[in-house]
Amino acid sequence: MLSPSQFYITREKGTERAHSSDLCNLFESGRYACICCDTELFDSEEKFQSGTGWPSFTQPIKENVVDYTKDTTHGMYRIEATCSTCDAHLGHVFQDGPPPSGLRFCINAIAIKKVKSKFRLVTIGGGCFWCTEAIFKNLKGVSQVESGYSGGRTRNPTYREVTSGLTGHAETIQITYDFSEISFEDIIKIHLTTHNPTTLNQQGADKGSQYRSIIFYRNNEERETAMRVIKEVQTLYDSMVITELKMFEAFYKAELHHQDYYNNHQDQPYCQAVINPKLEKLKTLYKDKLKTNTEEG
Ligand SMILES: [Zn+2]
């Protein structure tokens, strides 16, 4: 049962008073779910201090969890955000947010609740993201893999800009994983053994700093784990592992046609010549960690 104020906000499209909730100042890690239907909508990683008095996020956890509608009430032109599962009114979206999206999801605290999430994010690069994305989509416990750019100096880079090598960005993937099923350590180990972490700014025939081997850590524990795994896998290579370790700052999702590239272009020569052997290696090395056919990728 919704309380009267929850009903007013979510079903009658109300707006709570600014600064009426402590949720504005809460930044502990975790997720925020719809108060009506429990669907997870936002991650604390994308929450920011907007100073507006309403909880503010740069983006939802997945594109399709939020629906958008034109709202011209109150003499304004606004974009209304609703829960795509149950249609609950959440708040509005404005175009004055920080990177990576440049958007501000201005959400009523009453419409959401903090939930303990079983999901975490990890961002890594190991050459062309078409390859790394294809690999990690196969793993048990991995719920989402997105291709993008991280570790550079510019905001919202395009593929063309990253390819120039001037932005400092690496082609990366951002993985959402259920940490009760696969650990950060497992992911790093699989990463370091399914690409070549010993070639500087190069992966096979792909050359340039955008193809460098890189791991982004989000806290000290992850940094230490990554350092330990790098040491462990060093014994497997004749040359030195030169994977860069860097504090995570931002992940910029790549253009749509780069997402899920392998699955959409399996017949292409690059996929057959470069990605298929990597997938074979993955299947040999990590048979027990692969999804069964019934699980969604
Ligand atoms: Zn809902």
Image (spheres, rainbow, N blue to C red):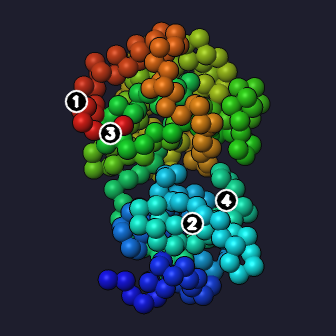
Q: Mark 2 is on which residue type?
A: Ala
* Residue 81 numbered mark, or none: 2
| For marks 2 and 3 on the same chain, the one whose residue lies earlier in the sequence | 2
From the image, which quarter does the N terminus lie in?
bottom left
Q: Mark 3 is on which residue type?
A: Glu
| For marks 3 and 4 on the same chain, the one whose residue lies earlier in the sequence | 4
Task: Examine the image and state in which quarter residue 92 appears.
Answer: bottom right
Q: Is residue 215 visible?
A: no
- How far is disc 3 from disc 4 in space, using C-alphas? 29 Å
- What's the residue at 46%, 39% (across, down)? 145
Tell me the element at label 3.
Answer: loop
**Residue bearing the label numbered 3:** 296
Q: Closer to the observer: label 2 or label 1?
A: 2
Whether 151 is drawn above or below 279: the answer is below
Q: Mark 1 is on which residue type?
A: Asp
Q: Closer to the observer: label 2 or label 4?
A: 2
- What's the residue at 58%, 31% (across, down)? 258
- How far is disc 2 from disc 1 in space, using C-alphas? 41 Å
Task: Examine the image and state in which quarter residue 56 appears.
Answer: bottom right
Q: Closer to the observer: label 2 or label 3?
A: 2
Tell me the element at label 2.
Answer: strand
157 left or right, relative to 45: right
Q: Is residue 143 visible?
A: yes
| For marks 2 and 1 on the same chain, the one whose residue lies earlier in the sequence | 2
Q: Position of residue 269 (x, y in %)?
A: 52, 10
